[in-house]
Image (tube, rainbow, N blue to C red):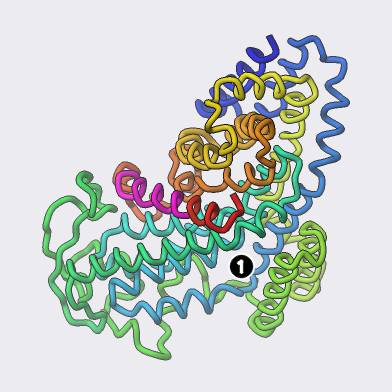
Amino acid sequence: MLTILGFAMIATFLALIMTKKMSPIAALVLIPALFCVAVGKGAHLGDYVIDGVSSLAPTAAMLMFAIVYFGVMIDVGLFDPVVRGILRFCKADPMRVVVGTAVLAAIVSLDGDGSTTFMITVSAMYPLYKRLGMSLVVMTGVAAMANGVMNTVPWGGPTARAATALKLDAADIFVPMIPALLVGLLGVLGLAYLLGLRERRRLGALRLDGESVETKETVLVGAGTGAGAGGGGLEKRPVAGGGGADDVDDDRDGGDGGDDDRDGGDDDGDLLKGLDPNRPTLRPRLYWFNALLTGTLITAMILELLPIPVLFLLGAALALSVNYPRLPDQKARIAAHADNVLNVSGMVFAAAVFTGVLQGTGMVDHMAGWLVDTVPEGLGPHMALVTGVLSLPLTYFMSNDGFYFGVLPVLAEAGAAHGVTPLEMARASLVGQPLHMSSPLVPAVYVLVGMARVEFGDHTRFVVKWAALTCLLILAAGILFGTI
């Protein structure tokens, strides 16, 4: 009976959040509470929740202060020179533009928030893609894959969820996975290079010096005719010159067709619609302090000099105090990032109810026992590999909350019966993230395709095969390095 009720609880939770009948936080709290009563252990609900909250408090603290820290770093302009440098590197070469998109998305992804990453990346790169006549699905696909790899940072969500669900330290999951994730990131960069070469062959030599260049704009997938995706035909259009095409002129600041890639010019700043060079939160005099602080923080995290929550707590306090010594300014910065902080940390505490009930009532043990009996004996010792492969479709067709809080604990228990450690299972569960970031259940992907004016169907058809290959590359590297 506990097996049936356990799967029923997970299925109910997944159905409600996938159909958007309830928010993840509400579903994480109310559904397990109801099932706890249904199994006759409602009197122990408080104990389950308190135990869960106590164990998850460090993870919630890490997420809270990491979001504040990287939010402040974006506010003060730490990443602005990186964006401008990438734009100068790109010039009018399609190959450089695509590689620059991957690099920019990967760097900005350090803030752990997909929506922020896509807003900054598209704001910076969209004008170049439009003016050069490049396929916009290449931009959305590369950005989504780069963000998917980097989304595995401990403060990004999946690692914290895996640590929460299995009651592990996020650093123990993430740090050994760094080599495999770097291989995945190199794979994305290599793919960006190849896609850029394909765009270069399609478009030929381009210039941004005011001369009109005739070229073709097309979608690199079989279907889709949305304007944002570049249409499906072979329409010739001027992409770099002055005034020949309204949809090109509308996408750049200033219609004179000046030399936008010249050294020392100000036009790079004009392209940074999402990073206003005159915003009042900038602190250019403190740039090197912020860069040193961020480098030190990441190094200390990798070396595990202090627990990650303590590192980000100290880092956020230092960043706020030094960059914004006036109390009203500090309050304004905290308020600006309060929504993200509340949503993420609230999710962690809500998960304490779900995981607490699942484990406290014994449902997870009964489900794991059933799953162990159904897994072929030959696959039992390879449950980490099975989990890695399953993470691709499961994290694509369900939210991270559903997978990490509903499915991973069951798989981990099944793996434990065959001698596979929870750490191996947690690391394997991260493999599907490059594909997950293009899931229709991820709100951030709608920010990406919306700002890029790409049809979601075009983006999906283009990115799924490449993202799946990236996931399998990470899985293979993790096995090769012995971390999975």
Residue 374 position by quadrant:
top right
Name the residue tied to disc 1.
Answer: 74
Q: Residue at x 66, y 13 (%)?
A: 5
Q: Which residues are magenta?
A: 460-473
Question: What's the residue type where badge 1 is placed?
Answer: Ile
Closer to us: 84 or 422: 422
Is the magenta region chiefly helix, strand or loop? Answer: helix
428 versus 205 height, above or below: above
Query: Which image quarter holds the N terminus?
Result: top right
Q: Is residue 447 visible?
A: no
Closer to us: 430 or 224: 430
From the viewer's perspective, is 388 left or right of 176? Answer: left
**Residue 172, position in %: x, y?**
72, 54
431 versus 82 height, above or below: above
**Residue 423, position in %: x, y?**
68, 46
Residue 125 position by quadrant:
bottom left
285 versus 328 height, above or below: below
**Residue 449, position in %: x, y?**
39, 50
Q: Dot 1 lies on which element?
A: helix
**Residue 160, position in %: x, y?**
68, 47
| Residue 465 painted magenta | yes
Closer to us: 447 or 310: 310
Residue sitting at the far bottom: 264
Q: Residue at x 60, y 23 (%)?
A: 371
From the viewer's perspective, is 315 left or right of 246? Answer: right
